[in-house]
Image: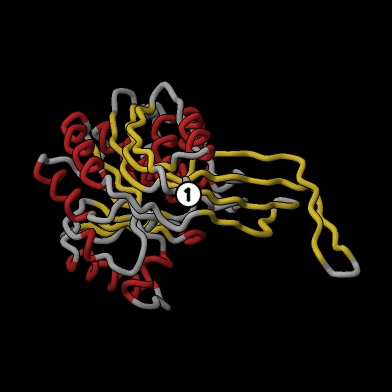
């Protein structure tokens, strides 16, 4: 594919999904307390970043698009921090605070660039304000070119079928980063972007390349999707479309530091590309290159339009 300088200016995307606060506790080294074999870590740096759907919104904003995010946060300190992190000139936050829930938070403890442990706080968002969520979605949809649903199975997208129906009724393409073992609820979406592990939970183990191609085509048909993109880590990405042969995008980076949030980058770049008018094939090509840049960074990361164009023109 011909390389060129791309831009996503004037593209606007609506993001709905599970907001998460990602925290990273860094230690240069760790030691063991000999008597009880208890690990001791001296934390010398703490970093907090938007995670989940919030990371999708930030990815979209950092490459030059306008984005709006709708979802839940807790009425707590973590929610305050997450809102502060999302204070971005290109992000419009429409967040519903839940008094009885904590903001979903994940703390990753790292030493020597290796993740030793992850601590999760709050399993799901449970709210009686779901009607308010749908009302905000309904009021916002018509102003955006693309809808991204970022599902982390944390309670925001409890009736994803309803949201898909609302968007399709208004002819707004729906892109979904799925989660869980029930993909039927995503039927009718324009694009689904599961990773290989998520894909295999639905279709069964794929031991050979032809298994992925066969089962991918069947899932595409069964769910009445316009397209399906299976992200395959070190093996790149494979795109399935109706009445077209699968297209494979080989991995662009051999150096992988951290895959956290790479799926968020993929769907963000695709959404931005489609909103700008690029074809789905071009969008996936750009997303694959962007993912190759992001996995070289530690932690939940984003990519700038300058970094993407530099990678495209190497």
Query: Residue 285: x percent and y percent?
Result: 37, 45
Q: Residue furthest top?
A: 89
Left/right placement of residue 232 relative to residue 170 reads: right
Q: Quadrant of the N terminus?
A: top left
- Which residue is more in the foreground, 313 or 102? 102
List the single residue furthest toward the left. Answer: 169
Residue 98: where, in percent of width, then height?
38, 43
Residue occupying the point 17% across, 52% down? 162
Q: Nearer the viewer, residue 98 or 189?
A: 98
Residue at position x 53%, y 34% from top? 81
By what rule are the colours in the image chosen? secondary structure
Residue lying at 41% horizontally and 60% vertically, measured from the top left: 195
Q: Nearer the viewer, residue 28 or 9?
A: 28
Name the residue located 47 percent from the left edge and 47 percent from the top edge.
102
Q: Position of residue 224 (x, y in %)?
A: 16, 61
Residue labelled with disc 1: 104
């Amino acid at each position: 594919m011909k390389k060129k300088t791309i831009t996503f200016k004037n593209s606007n995307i609506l993001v709905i999904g599970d907001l998460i606060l990602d925290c990273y506790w860094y230690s240069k080294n760790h030691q063991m307390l000999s008597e009880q074999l208890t690990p001791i870590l001296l934390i010398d740096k703490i970093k907090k970043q938007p995670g989940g759907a919030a990371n999708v919104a930030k990815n979209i904003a950092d490459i030059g698009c306008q984005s709006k995010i709708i979802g839940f946060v807790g009425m707590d300190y973590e929610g305050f921090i997450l809102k502060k992190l999302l204070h971005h000139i290109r992000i419009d936050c429409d967040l519903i605070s839940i008094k009885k829930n904590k903001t979903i938070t994940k703390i990753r403890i790292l030493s020597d660039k290796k993740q030793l442990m992850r601590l999760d706080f709050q399993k799901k968002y449970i709210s009686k304000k779901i009607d308010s969520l749908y009302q905000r979605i309904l009021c916002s949809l018509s102003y955006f070119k693309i809808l991204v649903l970022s599902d982390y199975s944390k309670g925001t997208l409890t009736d994803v079928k309803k949201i898909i129906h609302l968007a399709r009724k208004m002819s707004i393409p729906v892109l979904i980063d799925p989660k869980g073992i029930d993909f039927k609820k995503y039927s009718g979406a324009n694009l689904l972007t599961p990773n290989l592990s998520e894909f295999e939970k639905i279709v069964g183990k794929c031991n050979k390349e032809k298994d992925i191609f066969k089962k991918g085509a069947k899932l595409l048909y069964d769910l009445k999707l316009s397209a399906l993109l299976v992200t395959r880590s070190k093996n790149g990405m494979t795109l399935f479309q109706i009445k077209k042969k699968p297209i494979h995008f080989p991995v662009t980076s051999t150096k992988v530091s951290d895959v956290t949030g790479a799926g968020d980058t993929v769907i963000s770049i695709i959404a931005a590309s489609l909103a700008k008018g690029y074809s789905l094939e071009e969008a996936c090509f750009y997303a694959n290159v962007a993912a190759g840049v992001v996995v070289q960074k530690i932690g939940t990361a984003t990519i700038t339009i300058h970094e993407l164009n530099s990678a495209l023109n190497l």
